[in-house]
Amino acid sequence: MALFHVRMDVHIPLDLDPDVRAETVAREKAYSQQLQRAGKWPQIWRIVGQYSNFSIFDVESADELHEILFNLPLFPYMDIEVTPLTRHGSDVKD
Amino acid sequence: MALFHVRMDVHIPLDLDPDVRAETVAREKAYSQQLQRAGKWPQIWRIVGQYSNFSIFDVESADELHEILFNLPLFPYMDIEVTPLTRHGSDVKD
Amino acid sequence: MALFHVRMDVHIPLDLDPDVRAETVAREKAYSQQLQRAGKWPQIWRIVGQYSNFSIFDVESADELHEILFNLPLFPYMDIEVTPLTRHGSDVKD
Amino acid sequence: MALFHVRMDVHIPLDLDPDVRAETVAREKAYSQQLQRAGKWPQIWRIVGQYSNFSIFDVESADELHEILFNLPLFPYMDIEVTPLTRHGSDVKD
Amino acid sequence: MALFHVRMDVHIPLDLDPDVRAETVAREKAYSQQLQRAGKWPQIWRIVGQYSNFSIFDVESADELHEILFNLPLFPYMDIEVTPLTRHGSDVKD
Amino acid sequence: MALFHVRMDVHIPLDLDPDVRAETVAREKAYSQQLQRAGKWPQIWRIVGQYSNFSIFDVESADELHEILFNLPLFPYMDIEVTPLTRHGSDVKD
Amino acid sequence: MALFHVRMDVHIPLDLDPDVRAETVAREKAYSQQLQRAGKWPQIWRIVGQYSNFSIFDVESADELHEILFNLPLFPYMDIEVTPLTRHGSDVKD
Amino acid sequence: MALFHVRMDVHIPLDLDPDVRAETVAREKAYSQQLQRAGKWPQIWRIVGQYSNFSIFDVESADELHEILFNLPLFPYMDIEVTPLTRHGSDVKD
Amino acid sequence: MALFHVRMDVHIPLDLDPDVRAETVAREKAYSQQLQRAGKWPQIWRIVGQYSNFSIFDVESADELHEILFNLPLFPYMDIEVTPLTRHGSDVKD
Amino acid sequence: MALFHVRMDVHIPLDLDPDVRAETVAREKAYSQQLQRAGKWPQIWRIVGQYSNFSIFDVESADELHEILFNLPLFPYMDIEVTPLTRHGSDVKD
């Protein structure tokens, strides 16, 4: 398994059609929740005051992560930063 | 309760006495594990290739977080970046 | 209670309809003043020469701050930077 | 009167003599509190997780502010950023 | 009196109507020259190769400077950076 | 398998004992060549004019990469930047 | 021969005609694969979570590299960073 | 004649011998005042809260400016940024 | 005489009319070549992989350089960085 | 042949033995002049107000450039930035 820290910053164009916007945001939510329930996307937090999140992904490989991210409905409007993680030596969880 | 994302980058001086270094690192580990077990520091990950971690803190207040961070044995050697978090609207955990 | 320092930089698009602009700026002012009077937004200063402000928020939680900021009428046109604060050891105010 | 927003980041050298350090920090505190009581330095907040503060100064002039800052006992160890402020058009305080 | 160093970088949109552009630039020039003659804007230099200037303002207060800058005809197209100044200890002018 | 792009910038202190320096650099070379021969570190290039390299690592996991990097003899003197890679859709190698 | 490390970040405008986009991306792929098969572009990797690649070019000269890059069908939409490489002293490949 | 805008940031090492420091600062002041009186260095301002200045130099050539700056007693401790200036089209001084 | 190092980065909007683009680029080339032949612009190099150049200008004054740069046909689409030069003490050319 | 633009910024430690410093600077000058006379280093300019130079190298390959730079007597004290160049389409020199 491979663990990644991801920051996503969303910049939807101000002139995007409101219906397209609403529909895309709804698809993003459904897509995210499906991956959360599948255990691939175990953590997501909103950054206060930003249209941004910090997320943790727990996937088979970097290849799987790339597929997941490239298929985000909001991907065309996002800046994404990926950081690979490993177990910390002080972590009390085994 | 208040949730924070913290990045810590450790820069121990190369000429620090090895015994002081070892003792400080050991105290840091014990301090961190005590807070993890108390539920204040629920997540800690090593950033691959860096003497750095991403952590999540779940504390009473920003005041409590400040006390915790200022008392880290490695605090004098750290760059610390704190980001306040809130629940994400897509989070499936209630 | 939770104290936050917030910097807001406003970038209204040059081609925004002037009536929409004026109406949005007026709603922003009313919204801000209501929160100031409620004690949630105790300080706001203009940065000289910038369409920007430094503000202090005094709220129940980061969650409440996020709600407040996301509902700013000018939010879609703002860059926002949030910094959590705590009491300074030299502060003469108890 | 002139209003300024100041950020101070303190970097005391790790090898500074502990007595000199303690004595300098104590003088800094006394100096700051004297100016707070005189109304020159009405606000000071600790930035969470940082040896840093945000402060507001309310002085006769930039010349007076410069004198105050240059005489901070910790000045040789500080990075200081000064931003001039003016009244915000939405401020409910007159 | 209060002395400020200001850098202005002008970014007029490429598709601005040429007449509007010419008229705005002409108003900017008249406005600047009126303030120069009034002694408020004693120095202005062009930065070589840039649509930018360095200026010195000599005003009653930061509040007056803000009024002056916000009313620049080119203000909507400018990035402005303000630095408060004080007398230098080596200055031979008394 | 997991593929990573790594940039290493080496900053050996100017006052490091020349024998320690020579011995550490020699150990670094042996360590790197052993990993290259094992297929873990398939590519390494010198950046022209820099004491730096770009490398490709082909490892079991991010955990293995972290072990490898933390044990580099020059690790205490390095800035390391890790980027996870995946197959490019235009790559002719299958 | 001359070896270069190249990073390409692709920013196709969101409002580009979908047919033009698809046709340009297809031409980019064919162009890249022709150069890969000719040995000029021996390595290409996708950066995880980014519309970006790291590539290695093995060409006659910087002049040839410039011709190759300027003729990329996606060149008008790319940020490109070129770094000249040389053999690393620890490289086990002769 | 050639006009230059120069920013100087002074970073005297904390462990410099106090007598050397005082003597160097005194020589800097005398050197600066001699050039001011000669008309080569017509303006110098202190940046509030910084050990820094903005200066204007009015010299024969960039070569003369370089000689002047390289011979500043504090040159070894300074970061210096030089910007060439020309007459601004709105300047009322002819 | 005055010597300057100039970097020009060209960003022609993607939607500029192709005829206007071609005509402007042609005028830029003619303008540059006329100045090269006059000895004012003795060196120009393309930066590999970039729509950018490094140039050397050898002019009467910064004022003349500013006139030259402001009249570049591509000036509205350029970022320009100007650095004043002087003779290097190791230069073998007298 | 291969053409490179190189920027060198020199940071000699303030506490370097003056004789070592003088001897190293003298060797640097001799080394540079030998390469200039050999046609490998055809241009070198001092950046005004900086202990820095812009240089042009005209060498067989990036490998040769790397050898030249790594053997600069001041290399341990330098930040070096290398940019590959190619002929500009507007260059009147054939």
Image (cartoon, coloured by chain):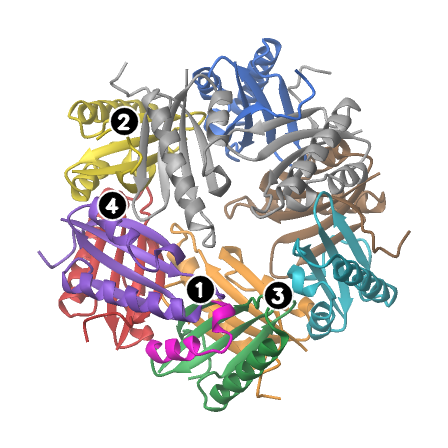
Chain colours: A blue, C brown, D cyan, E orange, G yellow, H green, I red, J purple
Q: Which residue is mark 2?
A: G43
Secondary structure type for disc 4: loop
Question: Which quadrant holds residue D30?
Answer: bottom right
User: Residue E86, image x and y in percent?
Assistant: 64, 75
Of all residues, the one furthest to the left in this rendering is J94
Disc 2 to disc 4, C-alpha distance: 19 Å
Above or below residue A24? Residue J45 is below
Q: Which residue is mark 1?
A: E52
Amino acid type, residue under disc 4 in the picture = Val
Q: Chain of mark 3?
A: H
Secondary structure type for disc 1: strand
Amino acid type, residue under disc 2 in the picture = Gln
Between E3 and E13, the residue placed more toward the observer is: E3
Question: Is residue A41 in sight in this rendering?
Answer: yes
Amino acid type, residue under disc 3 in the picture = Leu
Question: Which quadrant holds residue I66?
Answer: bottom left
Above or below residue D60? Residue C69 is above
Between C64 and H12, the residue placed more toward the observer is: H12
User: Residue G77, image x and y in percent?
Assistant: 33, 36
> What stretch of residues is rendered in magenta?
H62-79
Q: Which residue is mark 3?
A: H14
Question: Is residue I67 in sight in this rendering?
Answer: no
Secondary structure type for disc 3: loop
Q: Is residue J33 left or right of residue G12?
A: left
Q: Residues within 10 Å of mark 4 (few under 14, many from 20)?
A: many
The reply to whether label 4 and label 1 mark residues of one chain is no
Disc 4 to disc 1, C-alpha distance: 29 Å
- For the C terminus of chain A, which image quadrant? top right
Amino acid type, residue under disc 1 in the picture = Ser
Q: Chain of mark 4?
A: I
Marking on residue I48: 4
